[in-house]
Image: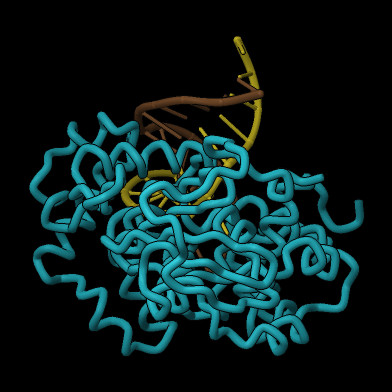
Chain colours: A cyan, B yellow, C brown
DNA sequence: TGCCAGGCCAAAT
DNA sequence: ATTTGGCATGGC
């Protein structure tokens, strides 16, 4: 059984009820959706689990939710906000039909069915993935929580802190960020925060750009190369064709292609192989490989 | 101890 | 155009 299926990595509890709000405000049918898989797939790092209840901040909106079978119970956050953040409108049957037919991709689909590509606010997604380079998921979480708790605005009625606005981070010095465990990443996050604050990087205006141009814009920011840019394209801008090639995807694509390749060659290979929803395929393969340790042909 | 982690960047080929 | 080495930190 995988870690995702066992669950409870974050503060394991047993069947506890929501404290501040006894009844869900909204109950929505979500057949074919998996809240746990989605939140544990390495797209976000600041979620918290209390028994069956999950809490996640989207910007300064606290989403408190529980999934019981096909029912999604919403304790805080609007139904529209939850539906948008968890991308409940994505055409999953088309996406699944587009998956490659090989055994490995189908095994990933079988394991991860129900996982969604989130729609994250652009700034917090960009900032978080700038800190992700050469870091394991658990440590990205640590850094994210440290930055939030030290510099982010508290969210009323919770112990959460929103991700600090660009202006807030731009006002800090590099040492303050290094004290959050960022190491050499501190300078990059600071530089990007200052570029956004100065208006040199308008993350919202950039939404209108086609994917290739948007990627080029993102790559002008310090600490943002092709991989991080693709993460932001996929997780924040909804560009479902974007493929972040990290060490896991590189291993998988290399095993599929069966020859030594540069990261760029692996991305080109994956674009051809994974199809129109390549970002979805990539995320399922990533989670499958990371939790089972298996690669194609093993 | 040594190795690796959802990489980026500038310098050297 | 492509490859290489340095960069901080923490977990196993």
| Residue plotted at (29% across, 33% down) | A180
* Side (left or right) of A272 relative to A65: right
| Residue plotted at (61% across, 57% down) | A36
Query: Which x, y percent locates residue A219?
Result: 35, 67
Vertical placement of residue B4 versus A281, above or below: above
Image quadrant in which you'd find residue A97:
bottom right
Q: Is residue A233 visible?
A: no
Quadrant position of the N terminus of chain A in the picture: top right
Image quadrant in which you'd find residue A286:
bottom right
Query: Camera-side residue: A103 or A272?
Result: A103
Query: Which x, y percent locates residue A248?
Result: 67, 52
Query: Which x, y percent locates residue A235?
Result: 47, 69
Query: Camera-side residue: A156 or A288?
Result: A156
* Side (left or right) of A27 relative to A153: right
Q: Is residue A35 visible?
A: yes
| Residue plotted at (12% across, 63% down) | A197
| Residue plotted at (36% across, 50% down) | A20
Query: Which x, y percent locates residue C3?
Result: 59, 51
Vertical placement of residue A1 versus A243, above or below: above
* Side (left or right) of A281 relative to A56: right
Give the total of numbered labels. Answer: 0
Query: Camera-side residue: A151 or A161?
Result: A161
Query: Camera-side residue: A63 or A281?
Result: A63
* Side (left or right) of A204 relative to A56: left
């Amino acid at each position: 059984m995988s870690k995702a299926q066992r669950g409870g990595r974050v503060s394991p509890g047993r069947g506890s009820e929501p404290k501040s709000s006894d009844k869900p405000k909204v109950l929505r049918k979500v057949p074919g959706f998996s809240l746990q898989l989605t939140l544990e797939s390495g797209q976000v790092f600041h979620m918290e689990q209390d028994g069956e209840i999950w809490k996640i901040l989207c910007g300064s909106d606290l989403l408190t939710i529980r999934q019981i079978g096909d029912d999604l119970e919403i304790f805080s956050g609007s139904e529209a906000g939850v539906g948008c953040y968890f991308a409940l409108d994505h055409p999953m049957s088309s996406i699944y039909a587009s998956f490659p037919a090989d055994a490995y991709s189908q095994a990933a689909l079988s394991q991860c069915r129900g996982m969604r590509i989130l729609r994250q606010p652009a700034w917090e997604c960009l900032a978080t993935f700038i800190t992700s380079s050469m870091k394991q998921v658990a440590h990205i979480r640590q850094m994210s929580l440290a930055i939030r708790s030290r510099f982010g605005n508290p969210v009323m009625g919770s112990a959460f802190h929103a991700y600090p606005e660009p202006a807030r981070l731009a006002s800090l010095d590099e040492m303050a960020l290094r004290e959050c465990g960022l190491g050499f990443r501190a300078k990059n996050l600071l530089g990007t925060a200052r570029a956004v604050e100065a208006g040199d990087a308008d993350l919202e205006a950039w939404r209108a750009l086609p994917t290739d141009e948007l990627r080029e814009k993102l790559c002008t920011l310090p600490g943002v190369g092709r991989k991080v840019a693709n993460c932001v394209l996929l997780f924040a801008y909804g560009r479902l064709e974007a493929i972040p090639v990290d060490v896991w995807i590189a291993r998988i694509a290399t095993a599929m292609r069966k020859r030594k390749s540069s990261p760029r060659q692996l991305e080109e290979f994956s674009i051809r192989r994974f199809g129109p929803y390549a970002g979805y395929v990539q995320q399922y393969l990533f989670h499958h490989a990371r939790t089972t340790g298996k690669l194609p042909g093993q």
